[in-house]
Amino acid sequence: MHFGQKSGKYRQAFGWGCTNRIQNGRSVCDSYHVREDVLYKTYVEAIKEITDNAAEVMETIRSGLEEECTGGTQERLHEIEERIIQLQEATLKAHKAKPRKSLVHSGLRGFFAC
């Protein structure tokens, strides 16, 4: 998008337009400039509509997330959790099986008073 100023003999307006069209002409982009005041008004109306219907918007988002997290996604998450548990158990088993030197055998026999 490009911000610019159009001015003529009797008018002066700020607006937004496609940079590609401005640089390369109408043959590559047939969009039109949008006046700054129209863009601002439209934006404010859209935000007002969203805030007026915030509960409905949140419900739409929530239901979309629930749909996304059901079926294959939930199954895949369960598989990943199971694999994490398996890896943790294997790590613990390997750690317990590791031979250790006792303090008695390491020459620290008299160091600890027990």
Image (spheres, grey):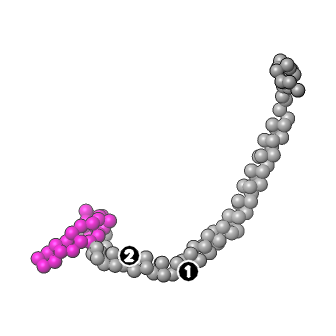
What residue is at 14 percent from the left and 75 percent from the top? 8
Do we see residue 68 in this rendering?
yes
Determine whether 105 is above or below 27 in the image: above
Q: Residue furthest front?
A: 113
Helix, strand or loop under label 2: helix
Q: In the rendered image, which residue does mark 1 sit on?
A: 56
Q: Residue furthest left?
A: 9
What residue is at 19 percent from the left and 71 percent from the top? 6
Q: Is residue 56 left or right of residue 11?
A: right
Q: Quadrant of the N terminus?
A: bottom left
Q: Quadrant of the C terminus?
A: top right
Kind of residue indicated by mark 2: Tyr
Q: Is residue 58 left or right of residue 32?
A: right
What residue is at 21 percent from the left and 69 percent from the top? 5
User: How far apart in space, not on screen, are marks 2 and 1 (Cα)?
Assistant: 19 Å
Helix, strand or loop under label 1: helix
Dot 1: within a 10 Å radius of its alpha carbon, few (fewer than 14), some, or many (20 or more) residues? few
Q: In the rendered image, which residue does mark 2 sit on?
A: 43
Q: Is 21 contained in the magenta span? A: yes
Q: Which residues are magenta?
A: 1-27
Q: Nearer the viewer, residue 68 or 10?
A: 10
Q: Position of residue 112 (x, y in %)?
A: 83, 24
Dot 2: within a 10 Å radius of its alpha carbon, few (fewer than 14), some, or many (20 or more) residues? few
Q: Is residue 80 left or right of residue 9?
A: right
Q: Position of residue 48 (x, y in %)?
A: 43, 79
Answer with the quarter of the image where residue 73 lies. Answer: bottom right
Q: Is residue 109 left or right of residue 22?
A: right
Answer with the quarter of the image where residue 75 lies. Answer: bottom right
What residue is at 68 percent from the left and 69 percent from the top? 70
Q: Which mark is residue 107?
A: none
Kind of residue indicated by mark 1: Glu
